[in-house]
Amino acid sequence: MAKSDPNWSDVDDYIVRHLIGEDPALDACLAANDKAGLPAIDVSPAQGRMLELLARSIGARHILEIGTLGGYSAIWLARALSDDGRLVSLELEPQYAAIARSNLERAGQSGKVDIIVGEAVSSLSAMKESQAPLFDFVFIDADKENYAAYLDHAIRLSRSGAMLVFDNVVRDGGVIDPDSDDPKVPGTRALYEALQNHSKVDATAIQTVGSKNWDGFLLAVVRA
């Protein structure tokens, strides 16, 4: 089976034209990321809008993002928040965090977002010790090797009923390919294994195709 199809991107373009429209702030964010040499691994516009709508649908006031990159998904998520809401975004690379802060400022969302630079597992552990407010929504799009660990931290830091979303959980079908040479597949599989029959979380995953090729999202809700 082909792992990509030009029609996928064409359909994404159709969706954006009809349901999202032009967005200068987001276009400027992607342009700045490209100019700075950041990897082009952001969610697509349609996926970004999906994240925004999911967060809005549950009335999220406190959002956690693991993996800021240049701030593209952070802009979408920040737009889901009311003026008194807060997004905490974790980023390993100081350069990426600086670019993200600039992009968020340009998009008029910097006042809602705190970017914490450093190794995410350490930052998450410190957040637990600080007894910060529990999160309503968590988006994880970072190093796949730590996905199972991020799941544990997300559960501890979230309220009952919180929504957790993991990106890149299909990986061109590599998640079921025993011969896959993708080094990110083992961590993705570990996430599925951790969630199988989990006592605190209900979860599903859905495959996606589009401008980001063949991949998918995993959606979970923390039980009461």
Image (cartoon, rainbow, N blue to C red):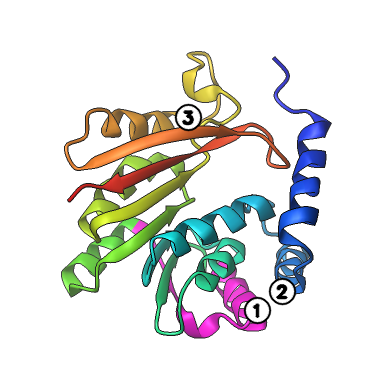
Quick check: marks 1 and 2 in contact, CB under 8 Å?
Answer: yes
The prevailing secondary structure element of the residues shown in magenta is: helix
User: Type of residue at label 3?
Assistant: Val
User: Type of residue at label 2?
Assistant: Ala
Label 3 residue SS? helix
Residue corresponding to mark 1: 107
Q: Quadrant of residue 194?
A: top left
- 112 is within the stretch colored magenta: yes
Quick check: marks 1 and 3 in contact, CB under 8 Å?
Answer: no
Residue corresponding to mark 2: 25
- 73 is within the stretch colored magenta: no
| Front position in the image: 41 or 80 | 80
User: Type of residue at label 1?
Assistant: Ala
Q: Which mark is residue 68?
A: none
The disc, 1 or 3, on the residue closer to the chain's N-terminal end is 1
| Residue 21 point in image, percent of width and height | 77, 62
Q: CA distance from mark 1 to mark 2?
A: 5 Å
Image point (47%, 80%), residue name: 112
Between tags 1 and 3, which lies in front?
Answer: 1
Q: Which residues are magenta?
A: 95-120
| Residue 33 point in image, percent of width and height | 70, 64
